[in-house]
Image (cartoon, coloured by chain):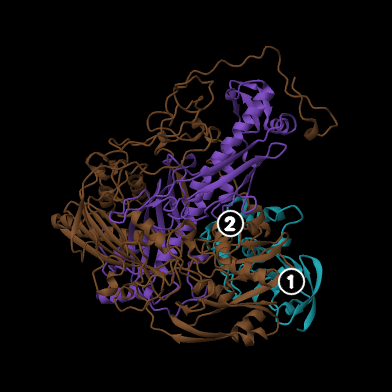
Chain colours: A purple, B brown, C cyan
Amino acid sequence: MTVHKGRGFACINYPIGMNLGGDPSQALVHSTPDGKFMVSLSAIDLGQGMKSVTRQIAAETLGVPVADVYVDTADSDTGPHDMGSFASRGTHRVGNAVIRAAAEARAAMMEAAAEELEVNPADLDTDGEGNIHVKGAPGRSITVADTAIAAQFKQGKTLSGRGIFLIPTSEVDADTGEMTPVSCFAHAAVVVDLEVDDETGEVTVSEVNSAYEVGRALNPKMVEQQLIGGAWMGISHALYETTEPYYPNRSHGPQDYNTYLMPGPGDVVPHHIAVLERPAEDAPFGGKGPGEMCANPLLPAVANAIYNAVGVRCDTLPITPEKVLRGIQANGGAQPREMF
Amino acid sequence: MSSIEFRKDLFADERDDTLKEIGKPTIRQDILGHVTGRSPYFDDHLFDGLLHMRCVRSPHHHARIRSIDTSAADRMPGVRRVIRPEDVPNNLNTLLSLINFGKDDEALLQGKKVAYVGEPVVAIIAETERQARDAVAVVRVDYEVLPHVLDVEEALEPNAPVVSETYPNNTFDYHDLYDHQKLRFGDVDKGFAEADHIVEGRYQMSPIEQAPTETCGAIAAPETNNRFVCYTSTQALFFSLGTTAKLLNMPSSQLHFIGGTVGGGFGGKVDSLHEPLAVLGSKLTGAPVKFTFDRAEEMQVGAPRGAERWFIKDGVMNDGRIVARQFTGFFDSGAYTRLSSYAIIKGTGHLPGPYSIPNVASNVYCVYTNRTPATAMRGFGITGVDFSIECHMDKVAETVRMNPIELRILNSYRDGDMKAHRRLAKNTALIECCQVAAGKAKWPISADAAAQSSLQGGGGDRAIIPETVTDQAGRIGERRRSKIPTAPGEGATSKGRVAAGSSVAPIVAVPPQRDDMVIDPSRTGHRKAGAGPAVPPVQATPQAPPRYTPPTPAAPVQTIPSYTPPPAAPVVQPSQPAPAVQPPAPEPYQPSEPFQKGIKRPGVSRFISGTRRR
Amino acid sequence: MVKTPIRFTLNGSETALFVDGGANLLDTLRRGVGDLSPKYGCGQGTCGTCTVLIDGEPHLSCLTLAETAEGRSIETTNGLANGAELHPLQKAFMENFGAQCGYCTPGMLMAAKALLSKNPNPSREEIVEAISGNICRCTGYEPIIDAIMIAAGQLRGRVA
């Protein structure tokens, strides 16, 4: 028995959102009487962090602390229309809608503050800590709370905003496929190191090194979560997962987590990530959604590393020990490949 | 132990990194609920008298339903209602009908012909889940088993069983014209003829379960005012609401959907299978009804990531340049369309991957087979073809005996390159990702590869759309009459040509409705490469309020800037936080007398007193 | 259907109710008592999201007959915090991004609590062993293991 080391590479780009049928998202922002802001959405947080990232986007746009913003989603009676959380569209589409809604609310807030301070709204700025001040004169200021109170109880104004973001439908040409599929792309490249046991066909991934370009890491810890968890899923897809192990035959399909295989906590692979940030011009603060593309390059990188280790090219997923072993046997033994 | 670094040095001149909340590692808004077990997932809503729904499901891949006998189930203890297919008011839908894409092809409860194992036929509502399961077991459905087809290529044979009568050719109809989506860019046959090597491959994805730890489900209950509330695990609230309104023929104003806190989705919670039946059950019983997958159903009835089969053929020069790439792709949609038709459009727009290849052709088929319908999953429409492309890139590298990273950098797309879907590339960063990943892994690449940049070397000749060869092969229904090849161009009786040219302007976002909805350009975090702020230079006086002007449609692009700022609106640009050269700051405001902010009257609520100006 | 009276302590409080024969503890806690913190993930004992502590030991409540809880002491995530003060495990999961969708979190917390009550100074391997019956689909487990390590350190510091 010999354990062969292998190394594989893959790189990808990933389209953010989908606009074949138009792809709108809406957001509403309003202030409470004392200057906290509620963001109403119908977007879904399924763990990717929709509530949290839109909260930061709203706070940044309004110019108030994140603690003073709360995102309420998803109630169809109060949250305006949104297509849904899929296709890496949430950060981009909902984020842009939130920016527009929060920008309008900010404009109303600045007008109300200007009336209180008797200055031109264009002369005002926020400090991000709950105060609005005259540019160049930080001492001449009013709190966001007092602005909201004045707006509602004295001026009779609402500090609120509406936002919609839509990239209209792109027709697709039947003969050439000409289309505007998406507005921006995220990028990734990964190097996978692994070991293949030529007696059992078992593959053990030992290390992943990666570079992910995400436009802007709107929240670096949540980006890290997505990249670590997504890469884990990519390895899982490559080596373990299938609902139909004898596809296209439907028999022996797993019905529980004992037979639907995924790496467990004991199979954690050290993953060293570099995050690159090249802001996309139409993305919220440049941020592209990292949630889907994080998994994609791991599948081919694992397959390429297995080929490098033992000379077996598995073009059919998942790459089970059985497939690796049959490949080794067909080749008359493991045949590690040259690195160029 | 893993590690993460943020390479702020790269593309630094395109970013303003002085934002206040963006870029901060703020903890999640919902995390306190998660760690205390109080986050309200759909099932975390208690109702008195909650009823439970289970479905009678097809045991056959393909069978005609002769009769359904539910009389024994009606008499089972605890059973409150048996829902038969004819009880569904408008029992035919396709998920994307909400955006007018595709024909209605799937029943909520199937009463005529089942087309996959697990297809629901009857729904039973009982007081406990156990009673519902027991009643399901005594429903008698008389099936006439039909021949089935499970393989995508077999499904395209002329004599293959018809999976869905809506699409009798076992393929989705694209543009009312072809049985597949075409992509044609240049002339791949010419490219293959010029190439030093031809590299071919076949790649097969497997169906994959999204496997969120929370299974799909919904609870519906009558609300006051003749409405229904529905707590749901959906990933798309208004998709589910709209689908329910359509299937049940109800005004959407009668539906109150609540969700947004979901125990993982990964694409598996878009299909809106549970909400319509839960609401219908609630309507028919007048009681709260829960309908959810158990784990076995989640694994085998819940729609997986569809299996894809891809054939790739590359023409490669000795120096590693790929001069032609051809794809033939088959998406296994299962018995119904759900989202696969859309995934193919998305996948087609993605070809030939992140590379600039002068000749590209592709035929992609959305194929119906007698298996669980496929749906979205993380990487929808892309994961399978990316697996194929990147395995294939390594085969190409081996063929020309080249470092695989250098091969990718050599062929990488760059700013200003024309993509096969006829739009210019911008904001690219593949080369930098390759370089950084190679560096982290200490995988040596040549000095030349390490010196490349996404910002340079693109455009020019690479921005031109080549003269393109087209064909009309694969019209809808042709394959029923005789076996014809599936690869691009093959089986065509005549070829057409589309002249070379340059790209039209891409479709961009609709501009904001009102001026006030535009974020101040100095606060967006963008900076133009090498030129300080990412906004046009200051033209108006700093005191003027921002004005928004809708963009005029752009003329066909002639030159390719590496970074195009938003359509030139005469936007005012207040002082920038970071750039080296500050615009002249306005004179600090000097009040004529000492300023005092509003005065509060003690002892009176600030909400009713307000503040009084000086 | 025959109802059986059962009595147990739930997070320190006396609890008594009638259950159907064959009812499992998960449904009984969630719908009978109204403690929604244990979650249904599979009903097959394969995912661990329903993990609760019975007399300090982790149990899969979906596979536990409610009647067997008679006279026992049950702990759930709902009782983990000391009033408004979070348990160090909760704090560590919160501050160190140990959750994404949060659905597996209550089960993870219970499995971790059982470990730390017996082994206040666990190695990473021992933590892996302790949570190996709990499925997480979002995080890739590493942040969860890290959070448990951190919480263990804080708990030791509190005792010392």
Q: Looking at the picture, do discs 2 and 1 lie on one chain?
A: no
- Residue B49, which numbered label? 1
Which three-letter amino acid code belongs to the residue tagged 2? Answer: Ala
**In front here: C37 or A285?**
A285
Tell me the SS state at disc 2: loop
Q: Around disc 2, counting alpha carbons within 10 Å, would you say few (fewer than 14), some (14 to 19), or many (20 or more)?
A: many
Residue pictured at 82% horizontal, 34% vertical: B605
Identify the residue under disc 2: C99
B190 lies left or right of C116: left
Q: In the image, residue A314 lies at what x, y percent? A: 32, 69
Residue pictured at 41% horizontal, 74% vertical: B165
Residue pictured at 24% horizontal, 63% vertical: B473
Q: In the image, residue C89 lies at what x, y percent? A: 65, 57
The mark lying in front, picked from 2 and 1, is 1
The subunit carrying tag 2 is: C
The subunit carrying tag 1 is: B
B451 w.r.t. B303: above or below: above
A83 lies left or right of B285: left
Tell me the SS state at disc 1: loop
The residue lying furthest to the right in this view is B603
